[in-house]
Image (tube, helix red, strand yellow):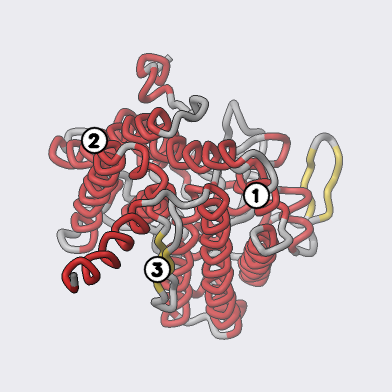
Amino acid sequence: MKKILLMLPAVALSFSVWAAPDEKAVLTHYADMAHAMYQDSLTAAKGLQKAVNQLVEEPTETNLSAAKQAWKTARVPYQQTEAYRFGNAIVDDWEGKVNAWPLDEGMIDYVAPAYGQESDENPYYTANIIANQKLMIGGKTVDATRINKELLAQTLHELDGVESNVATGYHAIEFLLWGQDLNGTGPGAGSRPASDFDPANCTGGNCERRAAYLQAATDLLVDELAWMTAQWAADGQARSAVMQGDAAQGIATILTGMGSLSYGELAGERMKLGVMLHDPEEEHDCFSDNTHWSHYYDALGVKNVYTGTYTRINGEKISGPSLSDLVVAKDAAADRALREQLDATLARMQVLVDSAEKQGVAYDQLIGEGNKDGNAKVMAAVDALVAQTRGIEAVVAALSIEPIAIEGSDSLDAPKKVFE
């Protein structure tokens, strides 16, 4: 009899472990994770802001290096938030303010002659905001004497409807810190000198205006991340949109974000397209050669969202009711398969990280023409992302929800169009 009594709690525990969580609990934790990720992104951006202000105050190579490292640190939590795009309209509509790319850097500052003087697609290709206090926009003169947040966000960002006129966000800041990467698919990143921000020893001209632009763009990034963090707070609009609708639709939102980032955005636009064109301008962090980490953390973000886990920048580990918990109760094989696919993708991304960090071969070198081994490493990650997208689709079927719309890419779906 004693043996039977001892066994009963274990049986009860077994049932509680395998019981599916309430869908609303999964959505609540999904929103809580978003709030934590954007809060961390805001904290890291404030660290970047502090480093930028120190650089402007004392433009030394040491302070420039510190600002560059702060930029890289700021990318870690932000890239993990990208799995919240696509399904969440409020995030997708806003994302271009902080992470738009690629950009035509000649609109912002001086560029090398090889950049060219004009573009059929962009009349402001070499506008050089930093060098010009008056700009002709749409036949009207715009006063750019004072470079501030309003000028960048309200007048210049995506000027004339041209997406590559990126005046704000991480990549505008990246360009200002590193300068152009003039190495093509060879070794080396941008190498802007700290004296480009030093009015007393100015090497690039317009040093005070360049410093003002850098500070305004960084301050604006902080403002935008504060706004998005608030959207995922208890009374935030993004949280409400997920929580107040049909629970099944909320689950579909999670899967749409995972699938679209995995397939069309990361596998297609950010990775395979660059391999097809062998063009370093197609790498995500093209000035800093930090692309390997951005891709890695994008992939990690997809896994975070599925497993309901996230490690904060202070080391705190968050976990809770997850999409994986829902799936395992419906189809354990589908859950196991997707988890294995997510891990396989991260392993392929780790190869790219190791190439850059341990072997000294950066992402732009890997996608270079004639680099068969490098191309193969990138394509192995692309193939893993495509496979995990198929796993996401299997999970949609297992949950018996309506099919989701996953973003595509010509590079994956119609490769011939890329060269038309």
Instruction: Assign a secondary structure to mark 1.
Output: helix
x and y percentages locating residue 416 in the rendered image: 36, 14
Give, as a three-letter code, the residue at label 1.
Met
Which mark's residue is nearer the viewer, 1 or 3? 1
Q: Residue at image x 14%, y 35%?
A: 372
Residue 61 as seen in the image, left or right of residue 109:
left
x and y percentages locating residue 301 in the rendered image: 41, 53
Return the mark for residue 203. Answer: none
Q: Residues within 10 Å of mark 2 (few under 14, many from 20)?
A: some
> Disc 2 or 3, which lies upstream in sequence?
3
Q: Residue at image x 58%, y 63%?
A: 35
x and y percentages locating residue 143 in the rendered image: 83, 54
Instruction: Assign a secondary structure to mark 2.
Output: helix
Q: Which residue is mark 3?
A: 311
Which mark's residue is nearer the viewer, 2 or 1? 1
Give, as a three-letter code, the residue at label 3.
Thr
Q: Which residue is mark 2?
A: 379
Residue 232 visible in the snapshot: yes
Residue 198 visible in the snapshot: no
* Disc 2/disc 1 C-alpha distance (Å): 38 Å
The quadrant where residue 221 appears:
bottom right
Give, as a three-letter code, the residue at label 2.
Met
Which mark's residue is nearer the viewer, 2 or 3? 3
Q: Which residue is mark 1?
A: 243
> Disc 2 or 1, which lies upstream in sequence?
1
